Amino acid sequence: MQLWLIPILPLAGFLINGLFGRRFSKGLVNAFAIGSVVLAFLWVLKTLFGLGGLTAAYTEHYFTWIQSGALSVGCDFSVDRLTAVMLLVVTGIGSLIHIYAIGYMAHEGGYYRFFAYLNLFMFFMLTLVLAANYLVLFVGWEGVGLCSYLLIGFYFDKKIATDAGNKAFIVNRIGDFGFSLAMFLIFRQFGSFDFAHVFAQAPAAPVGLLTLIGILLMFGACGKSAQIPLYVWLPDAMAGPTPVSALIHAATMVTAGVYMTARSWVIYTHAPIAMDVIAYIGIATAFVAATIGLAQNDIKKVFAYSTVSQLGYMFVGVGCGAFSAGIYHLMTHAFFKALLFLGAGAVIHSLSGEQDMRQMGGLRAKIPWTFGVMLCASLAIAGFPFTSGFFSKDAILLAADHRAPWLYWVGVFTAGMTAFYVFRAFFMTFFGKYRGKEHPHESPPVMLIPLVILAGLSLVGGYLFKIPDFLRPVFPAVEAPEAFGPMAVASAAGLLGIALAYLMYVYRPGIPDSIASGAKGLYTLVYNKYFVDEIYDAAVVKPLVGGSRVVLWKGFDAGLIDGTVNGIGARAKGIGGVLRLAQSGNTRSYATWIAFGGVLVIFGMAAMIVLGGLR
């Protein structure tokens, strides 16, 4: 089926625009950038139709990448139903984001470079998804980390953007260290990185070792999918262009951790403690991120913390054994989160770059199309009945209720907060009086068409695509049965959150200020994101940087290495300075030195003869 064509097409777009894009017109850049991704999407459809029902994984071997002793790693791609879902999400949503970016980036510098980076991002994410072994997956894993650095720091002339790119890169390297250790243990135990080989042997492996591998894999996922304690890079990623935020937060990078843990389901089902760790980290992240989202005023920051929280939901599903529910929410989240970010981008575009919701308001009459699509996305993420988020969120909460009721109740409370802060952003942006200074204008059709498509998917995608049924052959773990009571409670929590947001930001807009002043300490704590960045800076960054400067730079580098080299040079220079005195240029002086030297040689030889005779 030539699976290699799927990632190669975006790679070709990257190479063509990266090498020659500076000389191309924008139309030609668009043709290669968007055309390559759309063609990849069409090839995915052709491949899936050609493979029929995908009752078993289909694998293609291209060449042996590494051969060293017992280690043999092939460049192999594989497709099963889980891969099919991910391919459709990555190429489908990715294509819409590329098209939207034509309008959003129309007046930005580095146009060809931006689309080259986007294509490279797609190549690495598709490599990650198609990989048939952990090492090829790790290549894609590291590649999307590189591309996130390039795209988040796209505005490299702004310090805030370069700092955000560096932060994303460094934090992800910390998580990747855990992933690397997990791979070492996998090879040590199973003698292979191939999924089929590892998963076939996993049930017979020691539970303690599988638990350690599972926790280390989860630590890697915490970096990519922004879970506690490595979530801090994701909100700062808003420094990049809005299409980048949509691509990272919806279709590609942050979903990699969820995919990797779901792909490793055999390991986790035989390591229940590791699954508990995933569920607990997920629910804690979902709750904490939701509370932070309550107080943010930057529209993109609100949706960034929403992403962190929704990723936590996905990990709750995985940790409760409902792997297909986690992937189900991954797919529906791609619909409504891409729409939320691209809709926010349309708002920002209409206001000439303004992102503070306190400078918005009353925009529903000025940009009605954007208002309509943002309403669809907000309803979906709030879990409004029969929208896409309703189905996937309830699947996760039912699994949580089946695993541990307290997980369910924390999840329900978090769902209520999610509905509240998303509609808080919606009402602050589109209702009331306009508080800004710019003259809002609707986005061009090239931006609106992707928004309308995503709006439709946000409303009915969960009903049309029953992912748990589709993935049943992949994940034999039993999903929690549907129960009306827990579903009704979860839906009521979402509706209550929407009602409270309307009360506080439309009907009685003075209430939020009263609450903030009445609970000033708590509000300050939440508004400043629990000072986690400041704690990390004081406890980790400053000691590490300071220690590196004192010990490694001044002590080891400058003191030992430079001191040794410079000391040798100084001694050589001093000896040369003494010897230089003998180089006078005077012939009689040289003759005197030669005679003196001859006398010393003769004296030395005579002394040796005398000493030899005495013996």
Image (tube, rainbow, N blue to C red):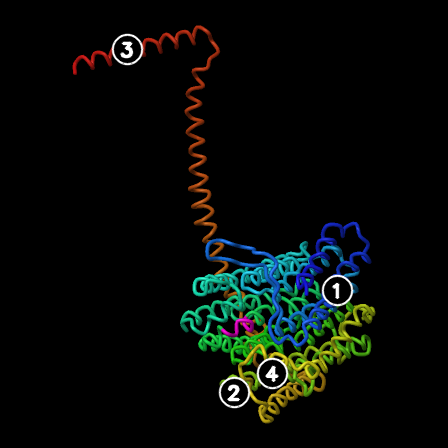
> The disc labelled 4 sits on which kind of residue?
Ala
The answer to whether marks 2 and 3 mark residues whose Cβ atoms lie closer than 8 Å is no
1 or 3: tag closer to the N-terminus: 1
Q: Residue 402 carries which label?
A: 2
Q: Residues within 10 Å of mark 3 (few under 14, many from 20)?
A: few
Q: Find disc 1 in the rendering and name its residue.
A: 39
Q: What element carries label 4?
A: helix
2 or 3: tag closer to the N-terminus: 2
Q: What element carries label 1?
A: helix
Q: Find disc 3 in the rendering and name its residue.
A: 603
**Image: magenta residue range:** 261-266
3 or 4: tag closer to the N-terminus: 4
Q: Find disc 4 in the rendering and name its residue.
A: 415
Main SS of the magenta segment? helix
2 or 4: tag closer to the N-terminus: 2
> The disc labelled 2 sits on which kind of residue?
His
